[in-house]
Amino acid sequence: MNWDDTTDTPAAERLVGSSADREDQAVEAALRPKDLGEFIGQEKVREQLDLVLRAARARGATADHVLLSGAPGLGKTTLSMIIAAEMGAPIRITSGPAIQHAGDLAAILSSLQEGEVLFLDEIHRMSRPAEEMLYMAMEDFRVDVIVGKGPGATAIPLELPPFTLVGATTRAGLLPPPLRDRFGFTAHMEFYEPAELERVIHRSANLLDVEIEADGAAEIAGRSRGTPRIANRLLRRVRDYAQVKADGIITRDIAGAALAVYEVDARGLDRLDRGVLEALLKLFGGGPVGLSTLAVAVGEERETVEEVAEPFLVREGLLARTPRGRVATPAAWAHLGLTPPRSSAAGNGQQDLFGA
């Protein structure tokens, strides 16, 4: 289970969580760029996608099917809407979990207009029967609708107008090869650099009519985990603080003070992240320690620690997953201002006996 994918999970309650709640969705709709020229970051993806779309327009044909992979909040939905806008086509939006039967997919496909863009979010979570129907639809623009049951069932071929499927996934490895191979263009969305996030924040601040100084934008960008969605969310919370506690202008000091209130530190770690690190360092001497033991020490479910906290800590080089258990890195000790012990349980392997 991906705890960042749904809004009824602990990840959705975190200010630095990458899932989108209703407030995020409403704000993102207003902040989304309308074309590739406005889209910030993902330079290689933008360049390649621009060539694909220009060539399709020059041929007077629909664009190839597009697969976008990457972590939540990096702009996959935004790019799908830009693809539709660049092609001058309408867009239909649905998601893998919403398609549980082949009939659900057949109903959507049969109602598409010629050239329409179908955006299928979390495509890896689509049911297997619907997935197999999608193979033929993508390749031959045709589906076979089964009428009846048992020996008397018959397959009625249904021709589809040419369309462009844009699939988005946070876990490309879960897609079966036959499905991946049917996409004409595949792009992986990378995390953003701080300088790119500063541009995102300045653009969003302008659209939200928020006055922000360059150092204030840099402070927010440095705590945004390389994700535009998180950057925009932090910007809104800092804006609220600046309006209540200051003169409404976001400076470095104001941004720092605001995010301290929300317990987001200089590297983007929140209460849960620091709780995991503090337990690992203070209780277990830096590890190795089993995941179950670490989760009990933090007071969280095993899945919450593994799926919500650990990915960012590993990406930041603060924690390592090893066969013997979780181990803190020297950077973790430095970040929390602690001195690693000269000798620890890491040498005798006792800690990993208590967890899986």
Image: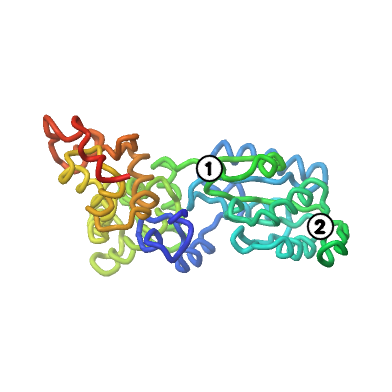
**Cα–Cα span, label 2 and label 1:** 28 Å
Residue situated in front as seen by the camera: 6 or 226: 6
Looking at the image, residue 356 sits to the left or right of residue 350; the answer is right
Give the x, y percent position of residue 313. 33, 43
Which image quarter is the C terminus in?
A: top left
| Few, some or many residues within 10 Å of mark 1 (<14, 14–19, 20+) | many
Q: Amino acid at mark 2?
A: Glu
For marks 2 and 1, the one nearer the N-term is 2
Residue 261 location, quadrant: bottom left
Which residue is rendered at x = 33% and y = 35% of the image? 322
Give the x, y percent position of residue 295. 28, 52
Residue situated in front as seen by the camera: 317 or 235: 317
Looking at the image, residue 339 sits to the left or right of residue 177; the answer is left
From what the image shows, is residue 145 above or below residue 332?
below
Q: Which residue is denoted by mark 2 in the rendering?
A: 114
Give the x, y percent position of residue 121. 59, 56
Which residue is rendered at x = 63% and y = 53% of the image? 80
Q: Which residue is denoted by mark 1 in the rendering?
A: 189
Which residue is rendered at x = 79% and y = 42% of the image? 58
Residue 271 location, quadrant: bottom left
Give the x, y percent position of residue 280. 22, 44
- The residue at the far front in this view is 151
Instruction: Give the number of the disc on residue 64.
Output: none
Q: Amino acid at mark 1?
A: Met
Looking at the image, residue 113 sits to the left or right of residue 201; the answer is right
